Amino acid sequence: MKFVDEATIKVFAGKGGNGCLSFRREKYIPKGGPDGGDGGDGGSVILVGADGLNTLIDFRYTRNFKAQSGAQGSSAECTGRGGEDLILPVPIGTTVLDNESGEVLGDITELGQSLKVAQGGFHGLGNTRYKSSKNRAPRQTSPGKDGESREIKLELKVLADVGLLGLPNAGKSTFIRSVSAARPKVADYPFTTLVPNLGVVGMSGEKSFVVADIPGLIEGASEGAGLGIRFLKHLTRTRLLLHLVDIMPYDESTAGENAQVIENELRIFSPTMAEGDRWLVLNKLDLLPDDEVDARCQEVVDYLDWQGPVFKMSGLASEGTKDLCAAIMEYIDDQRQREKADPELEERASERRAQMQAEARLRIEELSVQRFQARKQIQTEADDDDDDDTDVEVVYAE
């Protein structure tokens, strides 16, 4: 199934049914009164977090969704049938935005969580509603109200505790295969992951955490190079980032230079994310002689002037991975306990995630505009060249 993490759709709530204008006409009752019933309410459009979905592909080709309208009221004070709500299942981790205003309508982060994105129209009133001591035979009714309609944007961001950063072939997928049951593609030749992968890391005592692997970044990703930076938004929900560095690059670059590339791209993408908790993980130590490991690792730390935690491992040989996972679990448990004890801390963390998502959204939109302008410029230059080819130069003989 194709991985789609963005989709724009239009939703239309149902219209309320009109009220009915009717009077009783019964045998042996000489004076009938009003008996027009109300219409039914229009159906609403509701998004619900569903299990088993990991893509927005269902919304890529079907763009318009309309709920059922309410039925008109009828005589004998019968109320029209209400329109059925339209339930749209979406993956857990979906952010919903109003595409016109950019307002965040909600964030679906739990199974079964619902979010109403378009309210159904209110029913119209029958003439029974307007009878009074002064108006015994009202001919007044009200029409049903139109339901809400809006264009919304769906953004899927995977739910994970830990996110992996690094250049292509830094060993991110190998690390996930080593510590979880996830099986992303790995091989002995250079290539990059194309879609995010999730792995659940089980620890002792029924504890676990989720790791997210995204496609690798390259230099210039913030300007649209390679797969760009659009997948970085999937790390805005994580508590911790692991920066994996290949200690033995296959090309002529150095490990320190490669690590600096990622640091630069991250700061351009989201300053808030760059200021968050991040650990340096030096990978593929099995490729180095034992007496060179410490010196090579120290070179990277000195090059980056790294002040945070540093871990050394080999994902392929599963060396150092247990210590790293144990430290991650301890970190996550500590964060959860602190947030549970201090609600304000959890609120600040939520605000920080919202800020990262806003910065990510802004940067991706800027890139989209730049790409559109570049394509437009190329097309303009191509049209100018075509015009030059068809021009005929006239030379007058003397």
Image (spheres, rainbow, N blue to C red):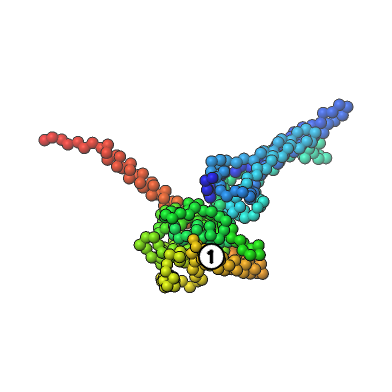
- Determine whether 271 is above or below 63 in the image: below
- Determine whether 122 is above or below 194 in the image: above
Tag count: 1
Residue 281 visible to the viewer: no
- The quadrant of the image that shows the N terminus is top right
Residue visible at 73% across and 37% down in the picture: 81
What residue occupies the far right of the structure in this picture?
28
The answer to whether 46 appears left or right of 182 in the picture is right
- Rendered location of residue 120, percent (x, y): 66, 44
The answer to whether 92 appears left or right of 25 in the picture is left
What residue occupies the far left of the structure in this picture?
398
The answer to whether 348 appears left or right of 70 in the picture is left
Residue visible at 42% across and 69% down in the picture: 289
- Locate residue 236: give its quadrant: bottom right
Residue 78 visible to the viewer: yes
Q: Nearer the viewer, residue 152 or 279?
A: 279
- Rendered location of residue 346, percent (x, y): 62, 65
- Rendered location of residue 390, percent (x, y): 27, 36
The answer to whether 305 appears left or right of 136 in the picture is left
Q: Nearer the viewer, residue 147 or 283?
A: 283
Residue visible at 66% across and 67% down in the picture: 340
Q: Nearer the viewer, residue 135 or 127?
A: 127
Residue type (three-letter) at the residue carrying disc 1 = Thr
- Pointer 1: what residue? 321
Residue visible at 59% across and 58% down in the picture: 200
- The quadrant of the image that shows the C terminus is top left
- Rendered location of residue 308, percent (x, y): 50, 71
What residue occupies the far top of the structure in this picture?
27
Q: Secondary structure at mark 1?
A: helix
Other residues around mark 1 within 10 Å, as few (<14) / some (14–19) / many (≥20)? many
